[in-house]
Image: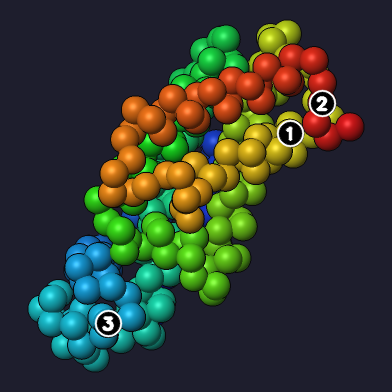
């Protein structure tokens, strides 16, 4: 059975190194093959036999790493979140004042990266992360970690006198995340994956996040 678990990946924080989260070569090939099949045929129609055939291994070998296609999907989601955290870590550590501008730039880029993935792969595991009931625990932990990442930047903004001091910086950013939730899957009906433009997403997301961050200059949403 693969050692790729949600807890392993979601343990990544600003001080951790990502090297230990990289999957072994055979598992990586399995995940790449499964992504191709899930994207082309959909998760429900893809079987473990299909994945084994695509990788070029026996089904018995496949079961040495994964008990089911649900476990394959979970590992794919874990790997996707790990890559996201590594990217966020790099952006947060490199951020320079003014920190409110850094938050806006990084978060809008995050929104655009997710939108780009979703447009290319309508049946992608990233969209399944938002849609499948059994993935809720992973999603909740992911969102909590994301709030902690950006909460660090909010604290730096407060120390730089860009906003009022906040009682709980991660909780303050959670409020921002809730306000921006429609910019992530499952998308608001006004955001069309097939015909929507990244320029439009960027414009709207920038307007919303600027409005919210401006409010933090005068108040603490956690009070």
Q: Which residue is mark 3?
A: 45
Q: Is residue 186 left or right of residue 172?
A: left
Q: Which mark is residue 189?
A: none
Secondary element at image label 1: helix
Quadrant assignment for the C terminus: top right
Q: Is residue 177 left or right of residue 105?
A: right
Label 1 packing within 10 angstroms: few (<14), some (14-19), many (20+) = many
State the scheme by which the image is colored.
rainbow
Q: Marks 3/1: CA distance? A: 41 Å
Label 3 packing within 10 angstroms: few (<14), some (14-19), many (20+) = few
Image spot of residue 18 (x, y percent): 41, 45
Circles 3 and 1: CB atoms closer than 8 Å: no
Q: Which residue is mark 2?
A: 220
Towards the viewer: 141 or 60:
141
Circles 1 and 2: CB atoms closer than 8 Å: yes
Q: Marks 1/2: CA distance? A: 7 Å
| First in sequence: mark 3 vs mark 1 | 3
Q: Which mark is residue 172?
A: 1
> What is the total number of numbered labels drawn onto the structure image?
3
Query: Is 146 located above or below residue 75 in the figure?
Result: above
Image spot of residue 216 (x, y percent): 74, 20
Image spot of residue 181 (x, y percent): 57, 45
| First in sequence: mark 1 vs mark 2 | 1
* Extreme-left residue of the structure: 56
Label 3 vs label 1, nearer the camera: 3
The answer to whether residue 147 is seen in the rendering is no
Secondary element at image label 2: loop
Label 2 packing within 10 angstroms: few (<14), some (14-19), many (20+) = some
Q: Is residue 6 left or right of residue 73?
A: right
- At x 59%, y 49%, the residue is 143
């Amino acid at each position: 059975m693969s050692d790729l678990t949600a807890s392993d990946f979601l343990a990544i924080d600003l001080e951790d190194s990502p090297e230990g989260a990289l999957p072994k070569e055979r598992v990586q090939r399995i995940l790449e093959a499964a992504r191709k099949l899930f994207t082309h045929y959909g998760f429900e129609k893809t079987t473990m036999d299909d994945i084994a055939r695509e990788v070029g291994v026996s089904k018995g070998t496949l079961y040495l790493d994964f008990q089911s296609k649900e476990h394959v999907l979970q590992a794919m989601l874990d790997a996707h979140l790990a890559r996201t955290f590594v990217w966020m870590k790099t952006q947060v550590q490199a951020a320079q004042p003014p920190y409110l501008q850094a938050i806006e730039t990084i978060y809008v880029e995050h929104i655009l990266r997710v939108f780009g993935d979703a447009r290319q792969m309508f049946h992608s595991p990233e969209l399944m992360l938002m849609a499948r009931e059994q993935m809720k625990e992973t999603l909740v932990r992911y969102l909590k970690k994301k709030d902690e990442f950006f909460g660090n930047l909010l604290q730096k903004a407060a120390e730089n006198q860009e906003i009022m001091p906040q009682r709980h910086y991660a909780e303050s950013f959670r409020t921002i995340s809730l306000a921006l939730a429609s910019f992530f899957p499952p998308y608001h009906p006004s955001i069309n994956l097939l015909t929507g433009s990244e320029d439009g997403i960027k414009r709207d997301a920038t307007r919303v996040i600027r409005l919210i961050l401006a409010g933090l200059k005068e108040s603490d949403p956690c009070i």
